[in-house]
Image: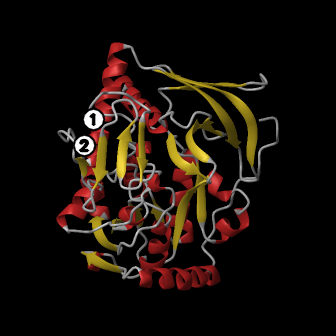
């Protein structure tokens, strides 16, 4: 933190050559996945008219899909850690840096600069992270307010099959699943001007109301890979049979509880099925929602507390990811307290600050991570004990924020 602040990234129009090069690479990969895109109401978008593209976020393939299907020049909102070691490249691609899950007036100004001065569209992933359980993650309330400020059309891009091909929990193991997308004209400038922020946010919530596992079952998408349940404990960390936490283990096609030894199979149709005895919860998003309610119950009773020894990394600017060393993380209803073992770091992140936090799996292939911070710095905490459910911290942070607001 004693280092001088970096010169801000200057947002620019994307390089024509880089866009052509990236598009050619993406087209080759998407062809193998039999990719196709359906347009809905896009005739309402005038030729040359800039807009805000909102896209659901399932895996890195999302960016390749966007490069392939978006019909005009666009800038991309990206996180600061993505810029590390690639600042020149990402700037040339038209990327706009920001921090996750924080209020960022600079981002809003940069996006408006793109619309008004660069005359480009902007691609935004409002969930700010990959889907964990195949459904939408929490959307920021300020999104509707920003859309009213921008006054440009809003287009929704929804991908299908992308999550099933490369779910976040599965350790970068790709499945043989075809991928498609829809591009829908969602809101016109006239509609935006006439609607309240609450009404806009409601339309956005409905647009992001997807369920990848339900879609798999309704369209009979078969995922037959023998590793489809590997690391599923990252998502389903709590056993619905005995109620123990951090004891489940996903391996092969099954999830096994180390406490009560109950075995669940993840079927080729994406359902959970108990090998012996009753199946308490069949649908993975329902299991995930049950875990969320359990966390909320703990918060309401005053029993919630997470303690973990962690290895700490920090991002400040775009030059490096800084290795802070080992430390300790505590999470309560008040927020996060992060301290380093050498005494140089003592940081408190108030529960009122962020509507969500980073809970990522195999972050830069280093390990599962709990992340938080502000516009100036972000801390990434990798639990030493791999059984610590990082996703529980995210559920708790989101529920605490709701209770405080």
Query: Is residue 11 or residue 395 the one in the foreground?
Result: 395
Query: Is residue 328 or residue 73 the one in the foreground?
Result: 328
Q: Are marks 2 and 1 in contact (CB under 8 Å)?
A: yes
Tell me the residue at 72%/66% (across/down): 88
373 w.r.t. 156: above or below: above
User: Residue farthest to the right?
Assistant: 3
190 w.r.t. 21: above or below: above
Mark seen at residue 286: 2
Tell me the residue at 27%/57% (across/down): 267
Q: Is residue 274 left or right of residue 25?
A: left
Residue 37: x, y in percent? 33, 78
SS category of the residue bearing label 2? helix
The residue that disc 1 covers is 290
User: Residue farthest to the top?
Assistant: 302
Question: Which quarter of the figure has residue 78?
Answer: bottom right
Specify the quadrant that holds the C terminus.
Answer: top left
77 w.r.t. 354: above or below: below
Mark seen at residue 307: none
Residue 194: x, y in percent? 25, 54
Residue 216: x, y in percent? 25, 63
Is any part of residue 210 visible from this angle?
no
Tell me the residue at 36%/72% (across/down): 177
Residue 268: x, y in percent? 28, 62
Is any part of residue 356 visible from this angle?
yes
C-alpha gap between disc 2 and disc 1: 6 Å
Within 10 angstroms of label 2, few (less than 14), some, or many (20 or more) residues? few
Q: How many marks?
A: 2
Specify the quadrant that holds the N terminus.
Answer: top right
Q: Is residue 170 left or right of residue 182?
A: right
Q: How is the image coloured?
A: secondary structure
């Amino acid at each position: 933190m004693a280092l001088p602040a970096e010169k801000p990234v200057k947002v620019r129009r994307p390089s024509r050559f880089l866009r052509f090069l990236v598009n050619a690479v993406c087209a080759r990969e998407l062809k193998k996945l039999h990719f196709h895109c359906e347009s809905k109401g896009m005739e309402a978008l005038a030729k040359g008219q800039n807009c805000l593209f909102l896209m659901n976020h399932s895996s890195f393939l999302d960016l390749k899909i966007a490069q392939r299907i978006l019909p005009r020049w666009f800038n991309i909102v990206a996180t600061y850690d993505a810029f590390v070691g690639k600042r020149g490249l990402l700037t040339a691609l038209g990327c706009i840096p920001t921090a996750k899950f924080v209020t960022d007036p600079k981002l809003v100004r940069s996006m408006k600069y793109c619309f008004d001065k660069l005359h480009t569209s902007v691609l935004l992933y409002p969930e700010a992270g990959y889907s964990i359980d195949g459904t939408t993650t929490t959307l920021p309330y300020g999104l509707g307010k920003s859309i009213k400020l921008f006054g440009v059309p809003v287009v929704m891009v929804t991908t299908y099959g992308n999550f099933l091909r490369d779910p976040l929990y599965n350790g970068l193991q790709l499945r043989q699943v075809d991928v498609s997308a829809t591009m829908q004209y969602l809101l016109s400038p006239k509609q935006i001007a006439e609607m309240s922020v609450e009404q806009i946010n409601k339309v956005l919530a409905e647009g992001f109301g997807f369920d990848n596992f339900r879609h798999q079952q309704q369209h009979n998408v078969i995922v037959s890979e023998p590793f489809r349940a590997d690391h599923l404990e990252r998502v389903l960390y709590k056993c619905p049979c005995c109620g123990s936490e951090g004891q489940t283990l996903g391996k092969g096609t099954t999830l096994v509880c180390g406490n009560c030894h109950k075995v669940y199979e993840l079927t080729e149709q994406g359902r959970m099925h108990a090998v012996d005895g009753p199946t308490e919860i069949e649908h993975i998003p329902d299991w995930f929602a049950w875990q969320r309610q359990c966390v909320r119950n703990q918060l309401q009773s005053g029993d919630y507390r997470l303690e973990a020894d962690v290895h700490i990394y920090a991002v400040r600017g775009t030059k490096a990811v800084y290795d802070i060393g080992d430390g300790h993380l505590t999470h309560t209803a008040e927020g996060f307290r992060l301290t380093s073992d050498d005494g140089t770091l003592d940081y408190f992140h108030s529960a009122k600050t962020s509507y969500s936090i980073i809970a990522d799996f195999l972050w830069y292939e280093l390990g599962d991570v709990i992340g938080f911070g502000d516009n100036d710095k972000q801390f990434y905490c990798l639990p030493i004990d791999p059984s610590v459910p990082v996703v529980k911290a995210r559920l708790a942070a989101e529920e605490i924020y709701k209770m405080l607001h």
